[in-house]
Image: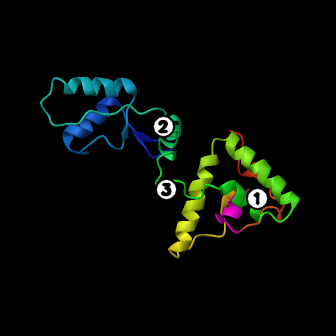
Amino acid sequence: MDIDKFGRVNVSEQEAFDSLYSGKISSFHNLFLCEQSVNRFNHSLDYNKDKIHKLKVLLDMEEEIEFFDQKNQGQWFMPKNYFPNLIDHLYSLAKSSKEKDRIDLELQLFIQHGMFDLLFYLKYLVDTMRENNIVWGVGRGSSVASFVLYLLGVHKIHSLDYELDIKEFLKEK
């Protein structure tokens, strides 16, 4: 039995069944079994009258996270047409051609990385936090390299003043 980098308990099929039937665990919700073991377990339930739920086969954790993100990013709650002029708003906040050039670059990178729609959600989140007097930090990690996130109010670090490279935030994998 071991624990992987995602906190999942990896056990053999026999360890899982022994633990379940001995009462040491009440479910498999925090165990990770290979696909073959999951399929064998689910097949055995077809012949068993126990009230045990079938198990779901998970993808590789990296794939699982990416799948979850793709499936759910478009389903976040946000009023329809909340701030339709986000791009115009960002450019209206720019005080120089250098800032406008940086906005151009960052918007292209956000689009290239499939993260453009997230900017609308971030604007909504920041506005909602302000309306409800919720305090958040001045900035954290590589996100402070983004001038667009600064303009949206996600953080308080003016990345151009500190010559922070946007590539520190939107790194290629």
Pick the quarter of the image with the C terminus: top right
Rate crowding at label 2 as few (under 14), some (14 to 19) or many (20 or more) other CA atoms within 10 Å: few
Front position in the image: 52 or 104 = 104
Describe residue 97's horizontal placement relative to residue 86 as left or right. right
Q: Disc 3 vs disc 2: which is toward the camera?
A: 3
Residue marked by disc 2: 64
| Cα–Cα gap, marks 1 and 3 | 23 Å
Residue wearing tag 3: 78
- What is the magenta range? 148-156
**Front residue (pair 74, 154):** 74
Mark toward the viewer: 1 or 2: 1
Q: Looking at the picture, does residue 107 appear above or below residue 124?
A: above
- Looking at the image, tell me whether mark 1 or mark 2 is earlier in sequence order: 2
Tag 2: residue type?
Glu
Q: Look at mark 1 in the image and give the residue it sits on.
A: 91
The one of 24 and 166 positioned closer to us in this rendering: 166
